[in-house]
Image: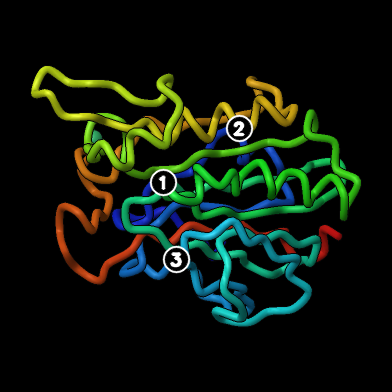
């Protein structure tokens, strides 16, 4: 299994693990969990641009979401503190990977990815399984009023310190529910890249290390 669990490759969703033709993981770049050449990734720009992937290629376009029905091709998302999200339609055999920071979350990139799956692969949102992976959680995501003011109040909390905190995972969960994904088909990890040991955080570490999250349909599963 290419995406082996090691000390530097930490989180696997039990929900996605139910699909026997799927491989996935939320790891770190130093662990380089992907040992195969067949990888598709994007030059991520905090956008709401979503690509249909039809061939392997590193950073083949600017965007922050992608999907494919190709087998043996990893979709790879790199994050520092943003939220990595992996999706699968077990019926249509389509996968997707999304990078959602605060800008992408405001621009509804996750909901737009689900919409693309429904229009291009006739996926039903109720069939989708989604894992919202390790990223900065509300505990650590302190923002200024210029950012907080752009979010609905349900995702903003004022702490005793007087600081404002944003819950990006909750906002992305709400997007999924709004487009018809079932709550029991969504796995939200509590892990916060800043305060949960073992994950990589740009805000905390100021290094080039990244989280590397990826999903793949196994060869022969098509
Ligand atoms: Zn935290």
Q: Sequence order check: which comes first, mark 2 or mark 1?
A: 1
Using the numbered discs, state the Cα–Cα distance from disc 2 to disc 1 in whole angstroms: 13 Å
Residue sticking out furthest to the left: 161
User: Which structural element holds mark 1?
Assistant: helix
Crowd around label 3: few <14 · some 14–19 · many ≥20 (10 Å): many
Q: Quadrant of ligand 1?
A: top left
146 versus 178 height, above or below: below
Q: Is residue 190 above or below residue 133?
A: above
- Residue depicted at 59% across the width and 56% down the height: 48
Q: What residue is shown at x 23% (from left), y 40% (from top)?
A: 144
Q: Mark 1 vs ligand 1: CB under 8 Å?
A: no
Q: Is residue 26 visible?
A: yes
Q: Dot 2: few (<14), some (14–19), or many (≥20) neighbours within 10 Å?
A: some
Image coords of residue 127 (percent x, y): 80, 33
The image quadrant that residue 210 belongs to is bottom left
Pick the residue in front: 150 or 26.
Answer: 150
Q: Is label 2 in a helix, a strand or a loop?
A: helix
- The disc, 3 or 2, on the residue closer to the chain's N-terminal end is 3
Q: Position of residue 81 (x, y in %)?
A: 32, 51
Q: Quadrant of residue 150?
A: top left
Q: CA distance from mark 3 to mark 1?
A: 26 Å
Q: Earlier in the sequence, mark 3 or mark 1?
A: 3
Seen from the viewer's position, the closer of residues 115 and 77 is 115
Look at mark 3 in the image and give the residue it sits on. Answer: 33
Picture disc at residue 102: 1
Q: Mark 3 near ligand 1 (CB under 8 Å)?
A: no
Residue 76 figure quarter = bottom right
Q: Element at badge 3?
A: loop
Mark 3 against mark 2, which lies toward the viewer? 2
Q: Which residue is mark 2?
A: 175
Residue positioned 86% across, 60% down in the render: 222
């Amino acid at each position: 299994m290419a995406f082996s669990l090691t000390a530097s490759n930490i989180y696997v969703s039990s929900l996605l693990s139910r699909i026997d033709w799927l491989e996935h993981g939320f790891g770190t770049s130093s662990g380089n969990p992907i040992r195969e050449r067949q990888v598709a990734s994007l030059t991520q720009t905090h956008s709401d641009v979503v690509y249909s992937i039809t061939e392997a290629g590193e950073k083949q376009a600017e965007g922050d979401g992608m999907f494919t029905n190709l087998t043996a091709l990893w979709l790879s998302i790199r994050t520092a503190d943003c939220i990595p999200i992996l999706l699968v339609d077990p019926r249509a055999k389509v996968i997707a990977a999304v990078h959602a920071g605060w800008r992408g979350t405001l621009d509804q990139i996750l909901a737009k990815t689900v919409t693309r799956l429904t229009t291009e692969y006739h996926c039903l949102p109720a069939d989708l399984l989604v894992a919202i992976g390790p990223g900065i959680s509300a505990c650590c995501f302190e923002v200024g009023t210029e950012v907080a003011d752009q979010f609905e109040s349900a995702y903003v909390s004022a702490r005793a310190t007087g600081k404002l905190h944003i819950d990006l995972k909750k906002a992305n969960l709400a997007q999924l529910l709004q487009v018809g994904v079932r709550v029991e088909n969504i796995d939200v990890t509590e892990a916060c890249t800043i305060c949960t040991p073992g994950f990589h955080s740009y805000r905390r570490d100021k290094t080039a290390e990244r989280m590397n999250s990826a999903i793949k349909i196994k060869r022969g599963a098509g």
